[in-house]
């Protein structure tokens, strides 16, 4: 795979699996590209909540807005330029604030299985 650059406009946003709120993910690199990781963007509407047991290691970089991530009684809040690591197997709650949030993420291995 050649060196490539991505922007938010390149992400094909889809509702996050199993969610009915305003939580969207858009992969720009994944198994379809022969990569061992998934890279993409996330978009959270205002005051959204996502409860998840991490199936993969996930690193989330906040680009806009802010998010709080809690696990095992510990909560961190991250804003633009800050990074949150969510280890595989960890039960987390991700909560966006009033302004919503935009993130970039990297997971290892892929968080989504290929269609077909």
Image: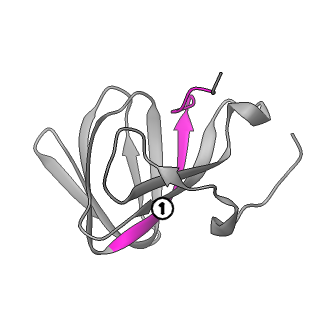
Q: Which residues are magenta?
A: 100-114
Q: Quadrant of residue 57?
A: top left
Reply above or below: 94 against 17: below
Horizontal side of residue 23 vs 108, given as left or right = left
Q: Locate residue 19, reporting x and y percent.
A: 33, 45
Rendered-image quadrant of the C terminus: top right
Q: What secondary structure predominates along the stretch shown in magenta?
A: strand
Which residue position holds label 1? Answer: 103
Horizontal side of residue 72 vs 93, given as left or right = left
Q: Residue furthest left?
A: 73
Q: Quadrant of residue 8?
A: bottom right
Horizontal side of residue 98 vs 13, given as left or right = left
The residue positioned 45% from the left and 55% from the top of the image is 24
Residue 35 visible (yes or no): no
Q: Quadrant of residue 37?
A: top right
Front residue of this view, candidates 115 and 47? 115
Label count reads: 1
Q: Locate residue 21, reporting x and y percent.
A: 31, 55
The residue positioned 35% from the left and 38% from the top of the image is 18
Q: Locate residue 89, reporting x and y percent.
A: 32, 26
Whether the magenta-drawn stretch holds residue 82 is answered as no
Coloring applied to the structure: one colour
The residue positioned 57% from the left and 26% from the top of the image is 113
Rendered-image quadrant of the N terminus: top right
Residue 16 visible (yes or no): yes
Whether the magenta-drawn stretch holds residue 101 is answered as yes
Q: Locate residue 115, reporting x and y percent.
A: 63, 27
Reply above or below: 77 against 24: below
The residue positioned 23% from the left and 67% from the top of the image is 47
């Amino acid at each position: 795979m050649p060196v490539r650059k991505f922007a938010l406009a390149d992400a094909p946003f889809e509702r996050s699996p199993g969610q009915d709120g305003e939580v969207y993910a858009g992969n720009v690199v994944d198994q379809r590209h022969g990569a061992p990781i998934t890279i993409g963007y996330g978009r959270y509407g205002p005051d959204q909540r996502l409860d998840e047991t991490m199936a993969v290691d996930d690193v989330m970089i906040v680009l806009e807005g802010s998010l709080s991530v809690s696990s095992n009684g510990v909560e961190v809040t991250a804003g633009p330029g800050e990074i949150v690591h969510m280890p595989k197997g960890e039960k987390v709650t991700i909560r966006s604030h009033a302004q919503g949030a935009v993130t970039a993420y990297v997971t290892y291995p892929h968080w989504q299985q290929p269609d077909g």
